[in-house]
Image (tube, rainbow, N blue to C red):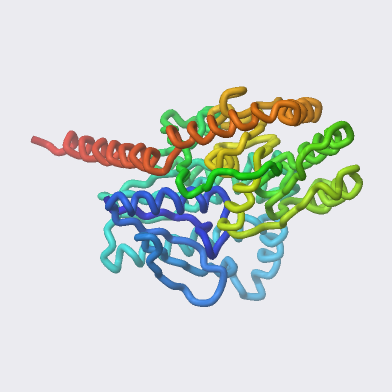
C-alpha cells in the first residue's frame, strides 16, 4: 500500500508528544513491512526539505502566519480575529500548508491509497484527494478534553471553533481509529459517530532495555491534566513516614491555570514547599534516548492523570520492566490490570496514591513482579509488529469495502 501520514509532530525535529511518537512508530513499522510510506510534518525553521528516515519519506514543511487581509480597511477584522480566534489561526495555517503539500504530491505523481491524520487540530480538514484514495482519522485526545482538564482559558471563538474543526475533520474520514475504548465511547456519544475501530498505540518493546535500579519516576508533560501535583503531594506525605527512593520528574511544563499562574511555576512551588524537595529532581525535557536511560535506572513509574487516552509514557515504562501505578481514568484500565501488571489507583485521591506508594515500599517483590508482568503485557498486546498487522488489516478492509461499494454501483 501507499500510505501518507499527516502529523505536525514528528521526531526528532518537532515535538515528541504522543501523536508524533505514534506516527513515528507506525510509519516506521509499515515501511519495514514493505509499504511505501510518506509523512508530512512541520519544519521549525529554515527551508522545507524531503528526507528519508528509516525507510519513510518525510516531507518537512513550513507554515507562516494566517493570511488575513492586509488592507487598512480590514484592520478592525484583523484585531477581532487576533482577539477571538488566535489559537484557531495557528491551526488554520498548518491546515492550509498541509492542503498545499498534499496537492503538490499528487501533482508530482505520488499515489496514495490511505491518508491518515490526527483529529487534534483538525489537520485533515481541507485535504483534497482522488477517488482511489481513502481518508483515515486517528483519535488521540481532542482539544476540548485537554482544555477542560488543564483548566485553560481561551477566547470565545477558539472555545467554539476548535472543537468544531476537529469534529468536521473526523466526520469526513472514510475510517476512524482510536487506541482506547474509553475515548471511542466518549467520541461516539459526543460526535454521534457509529463506527470507530479500536487499535492500540504501538511500542517497539525490544528497544527499551530492562530496568536495573530502584529510582521512582514520572515521564510526560508537566501539565494539570497529567496530575503531577497529585504525585508531589502524595510523595511528600510518604516521605514524612518512610524512606522511599528519589523521585525523578521528566518532562516540559505546559499550561496556565485560571489565576494566570503557569502550571510549571505551581509545581516548582509545591516542590520547594514540600518536606522532600531535596529528593525530587525535575528534568525539564530531554531526548528520547536519554529518557530511555532514565527509565532503565528506575523501578516504579507513576501516572496520576486526570484523563488519558492510551499514553506512551505508560507503555514505555512497562516495556522497560517498571512497575506502573496509574489512575483509573480513560484508557489506563485497558493497559494495566490491577495487581497483575501494575496498580490502578482512584483518580485524584492523594490518600490512595500514598497507600500505593506505601504498598510498594513495604513489598519490593510486588514491584518486581508487576514490572515483569507489565513488560510481558505490552510485548504480547502492544508491540509494534503486532499493532502494525492490525492497522494493515484495517486499511485493507476499508479499501476492500470501497472497491465492493464501487462494483455494486456499476450497472450490468
Q: Confirm whether residue 260 shows in the render.
A: no
Q: Residue at x 40, y 52 (%)?
A: 27
Q: Residue at x 66, y 32 (%)?
A: 325
* Up/down of 304 relative to 248, above or below: above
Q: Can you give x and y, in whole percent of width and height, for residue 357 in the image?
A: 75, 31
Q: Can you give x and y, in whole percent of width and height, for residue 66 in the image?
A: 58, 66
- Residues 279 and 390: in front is 279
Q: Residue at x 59, y 44 (%)?
A: 211
Circle count:
0
Q: Residue at x 55, y 29 (%)?
A: 182
* Up/down of 341 relative to 202, above or below: above
Residue 186 location, quadrant: top right
Which residue is most to the top? 339
**Does 179 sit left or right of 65 as displayed?**
left
- Residues 163 and 337: in front is 337
Which of the image's four quarters has the C terminus?
top left
Q: Can you give x and y, in whole percent of width and height, for residue 372 in the image?
A: 54, 33
Residue 307 location, quadrant: top right
- Residues 394 and 152: in front is 394
**Does 116 sit left or right of 335 as displayed?**
left
**Does 210 sit left or right of 264 as displayed?**
left
Which residue is most to the left? 412
- Residues 69 and 200: in front is 200
* Up/down of 348 relative to 32, above or below: above
Q: Can you give x and y, in whole percent of width and height, for residue 198 in the image?
A: 44, 32
Q: Confirm whether residue 149 shows in the render.
A: yes
Residue 393 location, quadrant: top left
Amino acid at each position: 500500500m501507499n500510505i501518507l501520514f499527516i502529523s505536525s509532530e514528528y521526531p526528532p525535529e518537532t515535538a515528541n508528544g504522543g501523536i508524533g511518537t505514534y506516527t513515528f512508530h507506525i510509519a516506521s513499522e509499515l515501511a519495514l513491512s514493505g509499504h511505501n510510506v510518506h509523512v508530512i510534518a512541520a519544519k521549525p525553521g529554515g527551508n522545507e526539505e524531503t528526507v528519508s528516515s528509516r525507510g519513510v519519506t518525510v516531507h518537512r514543511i513550513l507554515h507562516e502566519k494566517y493570511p488575513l487581509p492586509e488592507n487598512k480597511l480590514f484592520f478592525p477584522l484583523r484585531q477581532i480575529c487576533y482577539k477571538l480566534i488566535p489559537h484557531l489561526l495557528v491551526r488554520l495555517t498548518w491546515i492550509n500548508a498541509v492542503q498545499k503539500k498534499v496537492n503538490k504530491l499528487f501533482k508530482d505523481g505520488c499515489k496514495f491509497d490511505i491518508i491518515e491524520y490526527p483529529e487534534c487540530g483538525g489537520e485533515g480538514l481541507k485535504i483534497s484527494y482522488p477517488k482511489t484514495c481513502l481518508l483515515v482519522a486517528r483519535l488521540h485526545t481532542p482539544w476540548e478534553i485537554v482544555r477542560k482538564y488543564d483548566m485553560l482559558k481561551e477566547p470565545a471563538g477558539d472555545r467554539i471553533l476548535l472543537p468544531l474543526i476537529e469534529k468536521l475533520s473526523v466526520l469526513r474520514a472514510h475510517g476512524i481509529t482510536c487506541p482506547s475504548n474509553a475515548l471511542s465511547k466518549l467520541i461516539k456519544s459526543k460526535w454521534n459517530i457509529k463506527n470507530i475501530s479500536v487499535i492500540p498505540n504501538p511500542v517497539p518493546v525490544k528497544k527499551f532495555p530492562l530496568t536495573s535500579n530502584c529510582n521512582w519516576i514520572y515521564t510526560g508533560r508537566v501539565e494539570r491534566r497529567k496530575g503531577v501535583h497529585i504525585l508531589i503531594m502524595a510523595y511528600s506525605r510518604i516521605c514524612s513516614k518512610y524512606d522511599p527512593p528519589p523521585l525523578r520528574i521528566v518532562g516540559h511544563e505546559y499550561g496556565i491555570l485560571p489565576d494566570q499562574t503557569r502550571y510549571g511555576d505551581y509545581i516548582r512551588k509545591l516542590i520547594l514547599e514540600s518536606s522532600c524537595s531535596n529528593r525530587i529532581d525535575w528534568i525539564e525535557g530531554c531526548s528520547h534516548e536519554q529518557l530511555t536511560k532514565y527509565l532503565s535506572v528506575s523501578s516504579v513509574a507513576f501516572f496520576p492523570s486526570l484523563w488519558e487516552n492510551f499514553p506512551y509514557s505508560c507503555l514505555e515504562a512497562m516495556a522497560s520492566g517498571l512497575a506502573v501505578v496509574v489512575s483509573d481514568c480513560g484508557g489506563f484500565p485497558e493497559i494495566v490490570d490491577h495487581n497483575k501488571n501494575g496498580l490502578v489507583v482512584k483518580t485524584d485521591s492523594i490518600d490512595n496514591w500514598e497507600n500505593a506508594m506505601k504498598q510498594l515500599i513495604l513489598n519490593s517483590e510486588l514491584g518486581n513482579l508487576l514490572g515483569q508482568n507489565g513488560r510481558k503485557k505490552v510485548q504480547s498486546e502492544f508491540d509494534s509488529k503486532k499493532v502494525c498487522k492490525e492497522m494493515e488489516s484495517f486499511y485493507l478492509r476499508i479499501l476492500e469495502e470501497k472497491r465492493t461499494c464501487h462494483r455494486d454501483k456499476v450497472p450490468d
